[in-house]
Image (spheres, coloured by chain):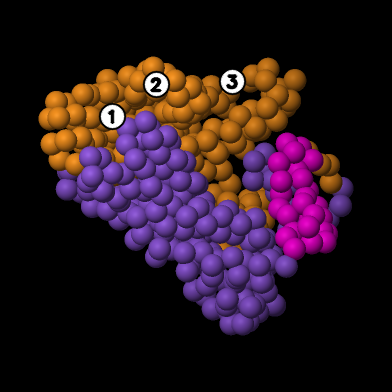
Amino acid sequence: MSLSQKAKHLGLGSCPCCQKINKMTAEQQRCIRCHQVFSQRKQYSVQFTLAWTLAAIVMFIPANIYPMMVFYKLGRPEQSTIIEGIASFIKQGLYPIAFIIFLASFIIPLGKIIGLLILLYNTKNYSKISKRKQTQMYHLIASLGPWSMLDVFVVVVMASVVNFGFFTSIEAGIGITYFTLMVIFTIFAAESFDPRLLWDIERRKNHDR
Amino acid sequence: MSNLDDENELIACKHCDSLARLPKLTSGESALCPCCGRTFFSRKVDPVNRTLAVSFAGLLLLVPAFSMPIIGVSVAGKYNDATLLDCIMLMINADFYIIAFCVFLFAIAIPSIRIFSAFYLSYKIKRRQFGASLLTFYRSYHLFDSWSMVHVFFLGVIVSMYKLITLDELSVGSGLISLLLLLFCSTLISITLDQRLIWELLEDELEPKS
């Protein structure tokens, strides 16, 4: 048995839940060990991933336009979007926090969306980047997912602690809802992507030659 | 080419789908995929006892972590603190239903389900009481793998402490300490729980060999 043999080509499928190797008799079947319904590849993986990614892009726009947080000082509201919040951190000289927030709420979501689009493109077209690198990239995207929620949790905690009525109070802005939806959509997109599709195209290319 | 009929002796990588012969491992070792280099599975040291201990500690910490004040501030003699449940109630009152639901799900419900499933599984395996319900519990543990966000919430609290420290007088509540310990427990569970061993045990016990 050669090591590069793929389970799919032998009519075998590995259960995504418990990794048990099953003989595939239908498109979708129940795992004999954990009774999870699965198929050899995640079904409609490319379509679902593309749909969730596009939804995330749509949500990215209002998330950055609308204010995340409203700061009331003596009754006067002061609204701030994500970028303005980061700018205020830099003004106060809190550079590490500004960097973390900038990373978690701007760079990571944007990077995830772009990365998923690149991976989607590579499932259809042969790419020069090695498959190992692409798989690593997918894992980075998948594992960074929850960290984008950081800004939402910060606003929620601040809004509930700083609550002194007229004097000083912080309230959440509308942007936070769009931002949360964007984060959830990108997590769904990463979950519905199947990294094995990246390896399938390599095989197809080798057969052509 | 050797005989490929016995699929019980094979394993497929879930990242690149390449097949390999199931390696025999002793505890503490990991098997890596020869094709893409990701981990197939690893054998953990004393998985059942350790998971039982850590998840029991996690269960005890759930209630204080959610119901004790996390941080408090005082402005001009007035003091205000908030628990995790307060945060959610406040978001509901401010009509941010989606946020309230998400915070509840990611910071309370899913971590609780994961810790409870780990505890229930390791307890039942320790007592050697096997039932079909274990499959459901273990599947739910897998399903919520990427949705538990206690670690992100904790970092969020730390960041907001930084933000508030310039504003007012700040105090740390016992909720924050319980939250930190809860975070330790849920991380330790993912380290101690031997996923493959539990599946193999469940398979052996639940299905009579033909």
Kind of residue indicated by mark 1: Met
**Which chain letter goes with mark 2?**
A
Q: Is residue A144 left or right of residue B40?
A: left
Residue shown at 36% from the left, 43% from the top = B170
The residue carrying pointer 1 sits among few (fewer than 14), some (14 to 19) or many (20 or more) residues within 10 Å by Cα, namely: many
Residue that carries the numbered disc 1 in the rendered image: A68
Residue shown at 63% from the left, 20% from the top = A126
**Which chain letter goes with mark 3?**
A
Residue A70 versus residue A63: which sits nearer the camera? Answer: A70
Mark 2 or mark 3: whose residue is earlier in sequence: 2
Residue B108 placed where, x, y %? 38, 56
Residue that carries the numbered disc 2 in the rendered image: A92
Q: Quadrant of the C terminus of chain B?
A: bottom right
Q: Which mark is residue A125?
A: 3
Residue shown at 56% from the left, 59% from the top = B185
Residue B156 placed where, x, y %? 42, 40
